[in-house]
Image (cartoon, rainbow, N blue to C red):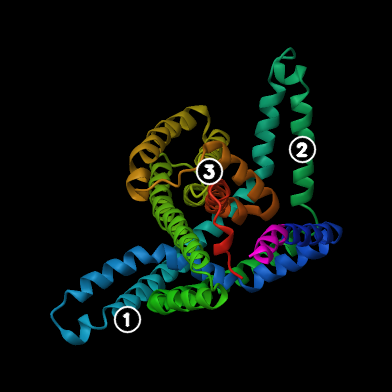
Amino acid sequence: MRTRIERAKWLPIFILAVILMIIYNTLGNFSRVSAEVTRFFSVISPLFYGVLLSYFLYIPHRLFERLISKIRVNFISKRARLFSTLIVFLILVLLVAFMISFILPILFASIIDLINSIPEYLRLIFDFIDDLPADSIWNTLNIIDTVTETAGSMVNQVFNAALVEQLALGVINFAGELFNVLMGMFISLYMLLERERIAGFFSKLADAMFKNKKTRARIQRYMQHINKVLFTFIASKGLDSVINLVVVTSILLIFDVPYAVLLGIIAGIFNFIPYLGSLIAVVLICLITVITGGFTKAIQVLIPLFIFQQLDGNFIEPRIMKSSLKISPILVIIAVVAGGAYFGIFGMFLAVPIAVIIKQILTDYISHSDHPEDPEQLEP
């Protein structure tokens, strides 16, 4: 028994030492490690997209499966999941065809027009700045000089000789990501079709790796919690983002705001970022509207956008998500900022569910430390 107690005492120290050594070597070769991590994630990106799509498609897939299972034809009802998968696949194909045929041309045209119009928009901004009084706070704090230098630097970077190469590289990257998304679509359909077998495999793997029953139960509880968090965030937030995309685009089209489809898609994407996402999207929309249509139109657009954001935040989203992620707004903001700083836009999207999972693990660890197990029950 004493050997078991000593092993339980020194094992955390050994694990901590190994972690510190890994961190030290990682910091010493950060650029190389970062490149390898980026390459690894680019390789598994189809699987990543597949997991995201499977969570997002689970609700309609499960709905079709329940409806088909009630059909009084044994051949069909016994294969409800297969037919549900085929229906979801057909809907996805139609959506992809619609996007490629109608949405993408409008989106590309808006992006190209916006890039070509940047010099004119900057000229309007500079004319507005020149008309400001000399004693304006903008001149007193040298804000205008900073904005002018930043804008000039951005223009030089965007409109240089390598613009054609940058656009070509962007098209190639987009084509690669589109291929990964299509591969992820097939992976997601397989995961929906074989979800019990996949869950059973991981259950057997946990049984083989962890012999202690309490450890297995704890791992199983963590996996269930992770699954619940990801489903709540991806599926519910995804549906709410689609609603945001449709409503915001409709509002912008009603008020004849340029780049309405592009701005609506941006609003839907940024809705995945709690608290900050919707605010950033509204500020961007208002800025574009001010530049292209003036302050009056910007105010006209801001009023229905503000009303919709209040309805979405207080009524629509809570009804869709049903269960809260139970995380502090401050922690959400810190997680989003950190995720965006280290992993870009995908880091901002996944920062919240990852933060919730880490919070749960730390909470369980603290509770376990307050009520430790009997040393005699430790696994030999």
Question: Where is residue 324 drawn, in percent x and y?
Answer: 41, 45
Q: Nearer the viewer, residue 290 or 309?
A: 309
Question: Where is residue 23 drawn, in percent x and y?
Answer: 78, 58
Q: Residue furthest bottom?
A: 75
Q: Is residue 3 magenta?
A: yes
Asked if 251 appears above or below 368 in the picture, the reply is above
Assess disc 2: are there few (<14), some (14-19) or many (≥20) residues with their C-alpha within 10 Å of its C-alpha: few
Q: Secondary structure at mark 3?
A: helix
Q: Where does label 3 land, which residue?
A: 277
* Position of residue 15 in the picture relative to residue 28 (left or right): left
* Position of residue 236 in the picture relative to residue 348 (left or right): left
Assess disc 3: are there few (<14), some (14-19) or many (≥20) residues with their C-alpha within 10 Å of its C-alpha: some
- Mark 1: which amino acid? Leu
Front label number (3 vs 2) = 3
Q: Residue furthest right?
A: 28
Q: Nearer the viewer, residue 124 or 5?
A: 5
- Mark 3: which amino acid? Gly
**Total numbered circles:** 3
| Quarter that holds the N terminus | bottom right
Q: Where does label 1 land, which residue?
A: 82
Cα distance between the residues tagged 3 and 1: 37 Å
Q: Give the magenta range.
A: 1-12
**Residue at the image position 62 percent from the left and 54 percent from the top:** 347
Q: Main secondary structure of the magenta part?
A: helix
Asked if 215 appears above or below 27 in the picture, the reply is below
Q: Earlier in the sequence, mark 1 or mark 2?
A: 1
| Quarter that holds the C terminus | bottom right
Q: Secondary structure at mark 1?
A: helix
Q: Earlier in the sequence, mark 3 or mark 1?
A: 1
Q: Which mark is residue 150?
A: 2
